Amino acid sequence: MSELHHWLVGLQNLIPGVALFLGGSLVIMLLQRWLKRILARLRHQTGLSVDTTLFFQRLGAASLWVILVLLSLRLMGVNVNGLWAILASTLAVVGVGLLAVWTMVSNITASLFIWVWRPYELGELIELLPDGLKGRAIDRSLMFTEIREEDGSTLMIPNNLFFQRIIRRAPNDKHKAAFERWESEEQ
């Protein structure tokens, strides 16, 4: 009889958590439909892309499910304080890590493209528009291009900016376009 009593007490601890989970699941499904309609209306009014709308829809749903599971476990007697800390720490580390890795990969890739397509050569006078950064390109690494301004100071410009800005090169006969070289040979 005591085993049955012990089992019933354990079941009493589980019932509120299971009930919260089942009720919360129904509420989340209704909220997902509502969020989908709101985002669809917003997409048509503002011109948001389908990808952006789907991202927000999935982010909202995932957040609600995580919160529901953690609250249900808490109600069942599971200590989830450590889980909250681990989840928050993991998200922070992943966010910072992705940002750092994205920046590095973007600059290294841009350096490779600068080397292949040569939008400027070392020693040339260049200007990034509309920022007005102007100087002679004196060095290039995997992350930065260094330009020396007229006053002697140097600027370290991330390589990926050369693909987000317009580059003005000072006139230089050595770097004529193929068409210009062909045209001058014809005359």
Image (cartoon, rainbow, N blue to C red):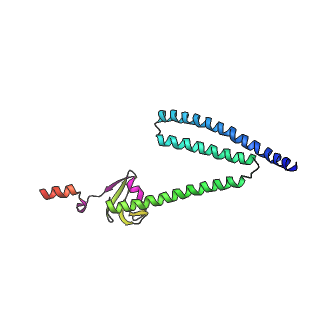
Which quarter of the image is occupied by the C terminus?
bottom left
Task: Look at the image and give the residue range highlighted in magenta.
Answer: 159-175
The answer to whether one can see residue 157 in this image is no
User: In this image, 126 relative to 14: left or right?
Assistant: left
User: In this image, 96 relative to 124: left or right?
Assistant: right
Q: Identify the residue at image location x=50%, y=59%.
A: 101
- Image x and y of residue 68, in percent: 67, 44
User: In this image, 98 relative to 19: left or right?
Assistant: left
Q: Between residue 3 and residue 171, name the one nearer to us.
A: 3
- Image x and y of residue 82, in percent: 70, 55
Assess whether residue 29 is covered by the magenta stretch: no
Q: Identify the residue at image location x=52%, y=56%.
A: 99
Q: Identify the residue at image location x=69%, y=48%.
A: 70
Q: Between residue 44 and residue 70, name the one nearer to us.
A: 70
The answer to whether one can see residue 58 in this image is yes
User: In this image, 84 relative to 133: left or right?
Assistant: right
Q: Residue furthest left?
A: 187
Q: Between residue 31 and residue 183, name the one nearer to us.
A: 31
Q: Residue furthest right?
A: 1
Task: Judge whether 20 appears above or below 83 on screen.
Answer: above
- Image x and y of residue 35, in percent: 57, 36
Q: Residue furthest front?
A: 1
Task: Judge whether 134 appears above or below 18 on screen.
Answer: below
Q: Identify the residue at image location x=49%, y=36%.
A: 43
